[in-house]
Image (tube, helix red, strand yellow):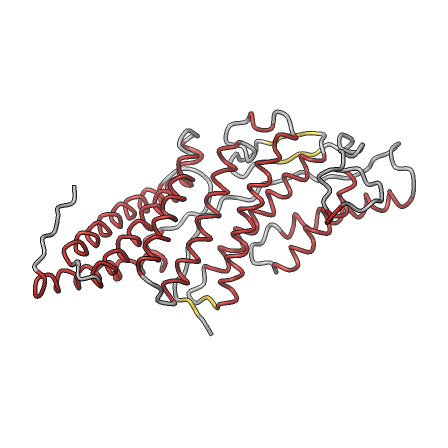
């Protein structure tokens, strides 16, 4: 059975809060059945929000509660005429008449006590999907944070991160249904924040793929290419936060920056190994030195992360197994390249500028 010894470390922001919703629609409910549905919605919503508080909760249970709530809540979003849509697609249906009847209040993952209120069922639905995406990313971090990860757990982690990225994307695509929600800078419905969440989840899913490729001893050229692409994705995520307040988003951005340079270091390390196999020893030495330089930059951002302002996990990344794994790899590849170049190839090593 496959077991990965590559423990991952993922930065996570706080879960977004929400106020209690009674679903008491006096004067609107016309039957005992509709009153029962509203009562069940209230209970299911509270249970779901409680499950979101613990990243270690069972994935199947959270999935079931999330799907059951949205399935029951669908009548507040789209018209329910009793006619099944093709392939279960409700996109062609119009908005429900119940869209504006209930008021909801939601906070934001990065803005502390700042809340937004809106009487719109889509506002509730998109916030819950956002919450589910955040929980999936937190659950993935909980699973992947172990020193030893079984194959089934690695697959669960990968699936959670990919699903989270898809949900963040869905929320961003559907924000046009609401008006004014993106006007609060740094809110979860700020397009820059949503895009950063999406790109981060995408990049972290790629991390799991890289770990698997390394464990299975795949071609170093492939691993180098994957690492370079992952570094680029982290860089794009960091750029989304560049214009937001440093005192709020500083820690999150430092995380994305250190991951960018960390995976550039990985990319150079495996590029060096590939060049060495091709007897391009001088280029291999240069690639490995580039990797060491990127690792030092990552260490600098790791140090800045520990003291950076803003919410989120507060640890010292350089003390984590995730971070400690790469340095021996870089040193081993560099020493081998320098040794073989000194004894056998005597190829010129270009300077790093």
Residue 106 drawn above or below residue 139 = above
Residue 76 appears at what percent x and percent y? 77, 38
Between 277 and 199, the one lying in front of the other is 277
Q: Residue at x 32, y 53 (%)?
A: 318
Q: Nearer the viewer, residue 190 or 171?
A: 171
- Residue 104 in the image: x percent, y percent? 70, 34
Asked whether the viewer can see residue 332, the reply is no
**Residue at (64, 43) in percent of width and height:** 128
x, y percentage for residue 289? 19, 52
Q: Quadrant of the C terminus?
A: top left
Exactly how many numbered labels are in the figure? 0
Which image quadrant is residue 340 in? bottom left
Which residue is painted at 72% across and 30% down in the image?
A: 119
Q: Which quadrant of the view contains residue 173?
A: top right
In the picture provided, is 113 more to the left or to the right than 201?
Answer: right
Q: Is residue 344 visible?
A: yes
Q: Is residue 114 above or below residue 276?
A: above
Left or right: 24, with 116 as reference point: right
Counting from the top left corner in percent of width and height, residue 229 is at 37, 48
Question: In the drawing, does residue 202 fall left or right of residue 229?
Answer: right
Residue placed farthest to the right in the image?
31
Q: In the displayed structure, does residue 298 sit left or right of residue 40?
A: left
Judged from this view, the residue extending furthest toward the bottom is 1
Residue drawn 33% across the image and 51% down it = 263
């Amino acid at each position: 059975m496959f077991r990965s010894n590559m423990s991952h470390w993922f930065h996570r922001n706080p879960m977004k809060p929400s106020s209690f919703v009674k679903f008491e629609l006096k004067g609107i409910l016309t039957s005992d059945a509709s009153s029962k549905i509203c009562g069940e919605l209230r209970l299911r919503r509270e249970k779901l929000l409680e499950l979101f508080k613990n990243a270690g909760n069972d994935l199947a249970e959270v999935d079931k509660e999330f799907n059951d709530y949205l399935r029951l809540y669908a009548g507040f979003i789209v018209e329910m005429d009793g006619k099944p849509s093709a392939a279960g697609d409700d996109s062609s249906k119009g908005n429900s008449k119940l869209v504006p009847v209930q008021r909801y209040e939601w906070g934001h993952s990065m803005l502390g006590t700042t809340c937004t209120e809106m009487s719109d069922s889509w506002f509730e639905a998109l916030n819950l999907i956002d919450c589910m995406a955040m929980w999936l990313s937190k659950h993935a971090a909980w699973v992947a944070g172990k020193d030893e990860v079984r194959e089934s757990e690695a697959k669960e982690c990968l699936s959670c991160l990919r699903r989270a990225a898809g949900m963040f994307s869905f929320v961003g695509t559907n924000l046009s249904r609401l008006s004014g929600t993106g006007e609060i800078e740094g809110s979860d419905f700020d397009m820059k924040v949503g895009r950063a969440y999406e790109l981060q989840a995408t990049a972290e899913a790629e991390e799991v793929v890289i770990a698997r490729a390394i464990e299975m001893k795949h071609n170093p050229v492939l691993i180098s290419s994957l690492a370079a692409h992952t570094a680029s994705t982290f860089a794009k995520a960091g750029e989304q936060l560049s214009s937001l307040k440093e005192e709020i988003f500083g820690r999150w951005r430092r995380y994305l920056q250190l991951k960018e340079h960390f995976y550039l270091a990985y990319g150079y390390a495996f590029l060096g190994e590939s060049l060495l196999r091709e007897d391009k020893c001088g280029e291999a030495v240069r690639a490995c030195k580039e990797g060491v330089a990127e690792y030092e930059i990552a260490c600098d951002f790791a140090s800045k992360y520990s003291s950076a302002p803003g919410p989120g996990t507060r640890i010292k990344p350089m003390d984590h197994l995730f971070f400690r794994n790469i340095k021996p790899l870089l040193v081993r590849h560099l020493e081998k390249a320098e040794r073989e170049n000194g004894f056998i190839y005597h190829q010129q090593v270009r300077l790093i500028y």
